[in-house]
Amino acid sequence: MNYKDYLSITPEIEEALKEGKPIVALESTILSHGMPYPENREFAGKVEEIIRSKGAIPATTAIIGGKLKVGLSEDELELMCRAENIAKASRRDVPVYLVTGQTAATTVATTMLIADMAGIRVFATGGIGGVHRGAQETMDISADLQEFANTKVCVVSAGCKSILDIGLTLEYLETFGVPVLGYQTSEFPAFYTRTSGFGVDHEAKDAAEVAQILKTKWDLGLKGGVVVANPIPEEYSMDHKVIDKAIDQAIEMAKEKGIRGKGTTPFLLATIKDITGGDSLASNLQLAYNNARVAAEIAIEFAKL
Ligand code: PSU
Ligand code: MN
């Protein structure tokens, strides 16, 4: 069998791929393991709508019924948002879930993998995974980073949460040759806040410039992806002190409970949400909408080249 036999692409996206129209991939872990129901359901619809209103086509990915889904129906979006018995699929889980038929949400790593197989080059998410704090001992480094090293997809995020060691995450990306572009910013954003104290490699002035950098990287035959770090809009950004305290508390609780492996990130995200109440969720929704807008613009510019 060819890898294409495992893909299930909606007719609309299939057509768009043939015609070279702009498409934006979206992940489903953010739905199943990153947000509560029914807020995630509203989010899933609205983020697709934003991409369409910009003139691009959304392609939410998931693993359902032994297939790598590219583009989900309303029922499939509902299934992912209900999040009943939905696993979290990182790269290593993909062959297992295809064989067992386990329904699974796709992380940044898996969404990049599927987007690349389908020929989609731009992907919008909330935050990327990275090197966890204390990774010197735990070796907990998200598979997202290796995907950036190897897979030809541009991911627009609001940076990463300081549940991670942001400095080490940026070092890792440098080692593996992954460009980190600030979208109209010279500082790498920390998801809930616009600043992190760490700089980016290059401040991209607009979507057209990002598209040129993608084309050039891939024309050169350089493998791997590109990180576009797009800060949360000022009006939705959170107070550094409030969010840092919640994150420290969540990390402490994870240690006490002995949380490890793929459960770590979902545990930390859920705990931060509990501690900060609705505030962090509202910020999360808005930054992801903002990323969808920028990703659609980049996909449109890239399709012109
Ligand atoms: N960080 C967030 N929100 C998320 C994730 C990370 O702020 O929803 C999800 C993404 O799907 C990301 C995954 O790819 O968690 C990383 O998980 P891990 O650290 O287990 O690799
Ligand atoms: Mn991990």
Image (spheres, rainbow, N blue to C red):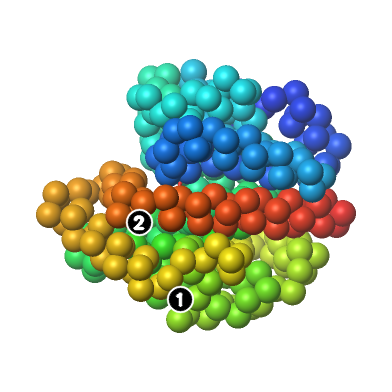
- Which quarter of the rendering shows the C terminus? bottom right
Residue 97 vs 267, above or below: the answer is above
* Amino acid identity at mark 2: Thr
Quick check: 69 left or right of 130? right
Q: Name the side, left or right, on which 269 lies relative to 68.
A: left
- Secondary element at tag 1: loop
Q: Secondary structure at mark 2?
A: helix
Front position in the image: 276 or 109: 276
**In the shown orientation, is residue 201 left or right of residue 15?**
left
Of the residues tagged 2 and 1, which is closer to the observer?
Answer: 2
Q: Nearer the viewer, residue 223 or 185?
A: 185
Residue occupied by mark 1: 196
Q: Residue at x 50, y 52 (%)?
A: 282
Q: Position of residue 120 (x, y in %)?
A: 69, 43
Residue at position x 78%, y 36% in the image = 17
- Crowding near the residue tagged with mark 2, few <14, some 14–19, many ≥20 C-alpha atoms within 10 Å: some
Task: Give the position of the N terminus as an image quadrant.
Answer: top right
Taking 243 as reference, is 48 above or below it?
Answer: above
Q: Can residue 29 be seen at all in this image of the molecule?
A: no
Identity of the residue drawn at 47% across and 80% down: 198
| Residue 48 lies in quadrant | top right
Residue 179 rendering spot, x and y as whole percentages:
59, 69
Q: Which residue is mark 2?
A: 276
Mark-to-mark CA distance, 2 and 1: 19 Å
Is any part of residue 170 visible from this angle?
yes
In x, y percent, where is residue 284? 50, 53
Callout 1 environment at 10 Å: few (<14), some (14 to 19), or many (20+)?
some
Residue under the image location 51 percent in, 56 percent down = 283
Of the two numbered discs 2 and 1 on the same chain, state the one appearing first in sequence: 1
Q: Position of residue 34 (x, y in %)?
A: 42, 44
Q: Nearer the viewer, residue 128 or 46?
A: 46
Three-letter code, disc 1 = Ser
